[in-house]
Amino acid sequence: MRNEGHEGHEERTFAALPPAHGKGFAQTWWGRAWLTALEDGAMDAEQVRAGRRLARAGSVGAVTVRPGRVTAVVRGRDRTPHRADVLLDTLSDAQWDRFLDLTVERAGHMAALLDREMPPHLVEDADAAGVHLLPGLGDLEAECDCGAWDHCGHTAAVCYQVARLLDQDPFVLLLLRGRAEGVLLDALQARGADTPGASASAAPRAEGVDAAEAYAAGDILPALPGAPALPPEPGVPPALDTDTPPPPAVEPAALEFLAARTAAAAHLSLAEALREPAGRSAGAEPLSVGQDAVRLAAGDVGSRPGAHGLTAAAGRLAAGSGRSREQLASAVRAWRLGGPAALSVLEEEWAVDSNVLARARAALEAAWEDDERPALRARANRWTVVDEACQLRLGRDGRWWPYRKEGGRWMPAGDAADDPATALATARPEGGEEPSPTEASS
């Protein structure tokens, strides 16, 4: 998700980002290229590592980006604030002219920028024209009020934070090189309109609009009408608790429950249809009886004002699915986090084949620095943290699910994550409280 900054004509300020879990900071190739310039150009590798730790801990405040300079206040390990600046040379007017020319020459370049992408061929074309967008060795200069003459932990932390911003929006790099997003887009549109070849004497064109041109112009077209508003809650079915006795074999409470769940399912379907991106695939496998019982119970309609029947139906749903009430409650908790996939992780322990196990071990190895990696005890698709009431479970889709021991039972602790470090951070209690030795080892 894009981090919205407060924009001036040639300055943007981004709110402080939360702590970064996992090993990598940059996900895009241009974000990694930015970090390579820092890591290869800094004189003291230990200062770079210190900066990475500060950035990971959330010690970097709001980041201000302007032409040639990035500024942020960074709190060191002793919590003392330091103003840290990272400097990068801006491009000359002639270089910007060459960049604009080569961008409008290929519609794909403009379309990629509007989609907040920086394709390698755009950077390669710019390099060939003498316009170096990404920093190279020694290009990132440092200034910090701690007195360091080269990159210190504070300026390195700013660089790591900038890599996260670049992942979200490559226009941050272009602003740092000297041009704000609005100025660039205006110039690109003006040059596109002035491009030779649109005269009346040109060869006749087929009817319609070129797809690349239409995509590139999407940023200046009027917005589409908004989607219809989603009702705040599903509709409440009518109450069936009347003075008229029900027909034989008809239970009003169970009927109210089913009607309420049908309304909730319709509300969910509408929400998924309106969601961006477009929600679940229409080709989902049909649910088993046990899964459908959990789906019904997960609606929790009995907890909402005006709704009825879950308390009366819970025993039947539990018995019909072969679960106790406690097991049904655990299954409902998992379902609300991730549907059938999360339920499978809760209730099924499966042997991991050799290829999947190798990938899982590689992910666990890469998720933490050597001095931060927890001790894990493995069994099947479950990895339990030694001396902690926390566990990681590997789903069949390759995602990691956080689990926490509560009242002697392993319970799902949050959403799945693509990397084990993020999942484990979710499983660990707020504030890092240690579990009792009995609970952690049971």
Image (cartoon, helix red, strand yellow):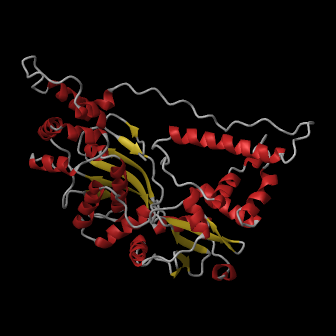
Q: Nearer the viewer, residue 432 or 297?
A: 297
Residue at position x 16%, y 38% from top?
106
Residue furthest front in the image: 248
Locate the C terminus by quadrant: bottom right
- Looking at this view, name the residue that lies furthest to the left: 201
At 23% across and 66% down in the image, what residue appears? 40
Q: Is residue 410 above or below residue 110?
A: below
Residue 33 seen in render: yes
- Residue 102 horizontal side relative to residue 149, left or right: left
Nearest the viewer among 275 and 312 is: 312
Task: Judge from the rendering whether residue 63 lies leftward or rightward of residue 183; answer left or right.
Answer: right
Residue 244 x/y as whole percent: 91, 36
Against 71, residue 210 (above or below) is above
Dividing the picture into quadrants, the one containing residue 54 is bottom left
Location of residue 107 in the rendering, given as x and y in whole percent from the top left corner: 20, 36
Above or below, comparing residue 358 to residue 122 in the picture: below
In this view, the residue in front, 238 or 415, is 238
Residue 276: give x, y in percent of width and height: 46, 41
In the figure, is residue 84 to the left or right of 139? right
Residue 313 position, x and y percent, is 78, 54
State the residue at coordinates (8%, 22%): 203
**Number of disc labels:** 0
Left or right: residue 170 versus residue 348 is left
Residue positioned 35% across, 70% down in the render? 49
Residue 183 appearing in the image: no
